[in-house]
Amino acid sequence: MKRLVHTILPVLICTLSPHVAAACPVCFGAKDSPMTAGMNAAILTMLGIIGSMLLGIVTIFFVLWRRYKRRQILLSQQVYINQEGILQRNHQEGVFEWNNI
């Protein structure tokens, strides 16, 4: 019941008092007014800020992905699985390869 009252009450207030739901002076006013030009500049500025932030986030994820791929290639070049199925490094200390003699 409370949820219904909280939903219907704002709708009734806006319906019974249309001046509350009217457009703002910028939207309702003249198209060539300085207030409209200022509002358009503010909207473009906010879009620029938000766009640059999103571009920065995408760049961070792209850089992290490239580092991950580079590290994955480096690790795959440094290790191998021998015939017994044990993971070993290519140039491990104490390992002597007879083919290098």
Image (tube, helix red, strand yellow):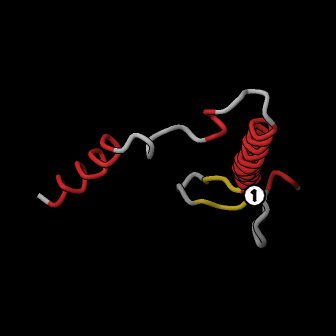
- What residue is shown at x 49% (from left), y 39% (from top)? 22
- Horizontal and vertical percent position of residue 42: 76, 45
Q: Amino acid at mark 1?
A: Asn
Above or below: residue 69 compared with residue 93: above
In the displayed structure, does residue 84 sit left or right of residue 59?
left
Image quarter (top left, top right, bottom left or bottom right) of the N terminus: bottom left
In the displayed structure, does residue 90 sit left or right of residue 29?
right
- Horizontal and vertical percent position of residue 15: 31, 40
Where residue 17 sits, quadrant-wise, is top left
88 or 44, nearer to the observer: 44
Determine the residue located farthest toward the bottom in the rendered image.
94
Above or below: residue 32 compared with residue 96: above
In the displayed structure, does residue 96 sit left or right of residue 72?
right
- Disc 1 target residue: 90
72 or 82, nearer to the observer: 72
Callout 1: 10 Å neighbours few (<14), some, many (20+)? few
